[in-house]
Image (cartoon, rainbow, N blue to C red):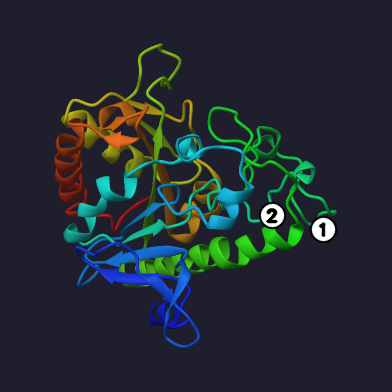
Amino acid sequence: MDAVHNLGVGTETRRDAPNPELRPGPDGEPALELAPFTLSRPARLTTPLVFASPHSGRFYPPAMLEASKLDAAAIRRSEDAFVDRLIGGSVGSGTPLIAANYARAYMDVNREPYELDPAMFEDELPAFACARTARVAAGLGSIARVVAEGQEIYRGKLTFGDAKERIEHVHRPYHVALQDLLEETRAAFGTAILIDWHSMPSAATGGGSGRAADFVLGDRFGVACSRRVTDLWERELNAHGYRVARNAPYAGGYTTEFYGKPQRGVHALQIEINRGLYLDEVSLEPHTGFGGLERDLGAVFAKLVAQDWSRLP
C-alpha cells in the first residue's frame, strides 16, 4: 500500500482521520482539487473485511458546476450522502475503509471506466468504449447524463478528452488502491471480503413484498460471495430489528461483479442502506436517526470482525 500512497494518487489516513487533504502540487503547494479517494486504515489489519464507499463523494470540480444546468441542491441527488461517515467507525474495529472523494455525478467508480454515452460527447468515442449497456441507456454510465431523478446535468456536450482525464485521475487510482488493498488483505488472511456500501431512496422496496427494506444485500444472486457472508450480515442486521432483503431491487454493481471471485479468495457483497433511516432526503442532511444507526452498525461491525472467516466455502 505504500506504493499507492507514494504515487500521490490518493490520501491515506489513519483511524479518526480528518477530511481529505488537498493533493500536493508540483511545488509542494496544495492543488485546487482533492485526491480521488481517502483510505482510512487501522493501526493494523485484524480482519479480512474491507469496506468501500464509492458514491459518498461530495466534491464537484468548478468546471463541472459551470457546465451544469442544475443548481447545487439538484446535482447532489445522486449522492450516497454521508455513507462514508456512517460507516467510518469500522476503522476502529480493524477494518480499512476506502471512500471516493469525487461525486459520482462527476465520475462513477462503480461503473466500467469507459461505460460512456456517445450522445454526451461532441467527438467520437473509441471502439473499446462500452456504449450499449442498461446503465448507459438510463443515463447513469461512468459519467452520468442525469442525476437520480432524471434531470439532465449538462447544458452542452463534453469531449472524450474530458472523459479520459476523469477516468485517469479518479476512476483508475481508486481501483488501483482498492485492488492493492484486497490483495494485501488476502495475503494476510487467506481471503478478502469486500463490503461495498451504498444508500437507496426510502421508496425502494425489497423482494417485491411492498414493504420498504432497511437494507438490501446484493451478492449477484450468490455468485459474488459465499452464502455464509451474506447470511451472517443478514443475521446481525436482523438482530438489531432491521428488515433485510436480498438482491432486489439491487443485486450488486460493477464493483461487486468485478471483484467478487470467491473461487480466487475474494468475496464481494453490496449493502444498500435505506436513506430514510438517517437522512433528510430533501435537505440531504443527517437527521436524528443518524446516531442510532451509526451505533447499531458499530455493534454489527464488532460482531463480524470477531467472526472466524478462515473457512469460507
Res. 231 image quadrant: top left
The picture places residue 110, in percent across and down from the top left corner, at 53, 49
User: What residue does disc 2 label?
Assistant: 114
Q: CA distance from mark 1 to mark 2?
A: 9 Å
Amino acid type indicated by mark 2:
Tyr
Amino acid type indicated by mark 1:
Pro
For residue 126, which numbered disc appears in the image?
A: 1
SS of the residue under disc 2: loop
SS of the residue under disc 1: loop
Q: Quadrant of the N terminus?
A: bottom left
Q: Is residue 53 left or right of residue 179?
A: left
Question: Few, some or many C-alpha atoms within 10 Å of disc 1 (few <14, some 14-19, many ≥20)?
Answer: few
The picture places residue 311, in percent across and down from the top left corner, at 31, 55
The answer to the question of whether label 1 and label 2 lie on touching residues, with beta carbons closer than 8 A, is: yes
Tag count: 2
Residue 84, compared with residue 186, is above or below; it is: above
